[in-house]
Image (cartoon, rainbow, N blue to C red):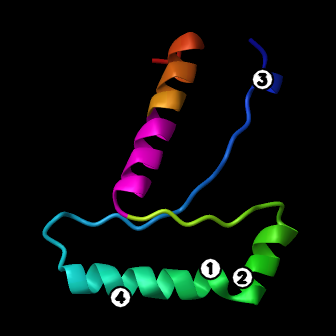
Amino acid sequence: MGLGDFVTTAWFGLIADESFPDEAVQTLQGALENVMEDQSFRDFVAQIGGETASHEGDEFRDYVAQDVERWQDVAGQAELQ
């Protein structure tokens, strides 16, 4: 398996403890959505070769878990663990 077989991504997210107030979660989510919809932000992301996407709640949790599992598998195959 060579490096050409891999496609990497970078993602950024906010993660809070379950005790974080729902109202605060909604406020942060709304602020993030505003940034993600801002054309200057979208232009910047496109300029550096990126794409925007938005996941929240369980969907984001699942996305992170799948990414961690994927890279644990890659590290195991490369005997990096």
Which quarter of the rendering shows the N terminus? top right
Q: Amino acid at mark 2?
A: Phe
The numbered disc on residue 5 is: 3
Q: Amino acid at mark 1?
A: Met
Q: Residue at label 1? A: 36
Sequence-wise, the earlier of marks 1 and 4 is 4
Sequence-wise, the earlier of marks 2 and 4 is 4
**Cα separation between marks 2 and 4:** 19 Å
Q: Was residue 60 drawn as part of the magenta stretch in this picture?
A: yes
Give yes or no for contact between labels 2 and 1 (Cβ–Cβ under 8 Å).
yes
**The magenta segment:** 57-68
Of badges 1 and 3, nearer the viewer stands: 1
Q: Amino acid at mark 3?
A: Asp
Q: Position of residue 40 (x, y in %)?
A: 77, 88
**Cα separation between marks 3 and 2:** 30 Å
Sequence-wise, the earlier of marks 1 and 3 is 3
Circle 2 SS class: helix
Foreground of the two, 11 or 61? 61
The numbered disc on residue 41 is: 2
Give the image quarter of residue 4. top right
For image coordinates 34% across by 64% down, the residue present is: 15
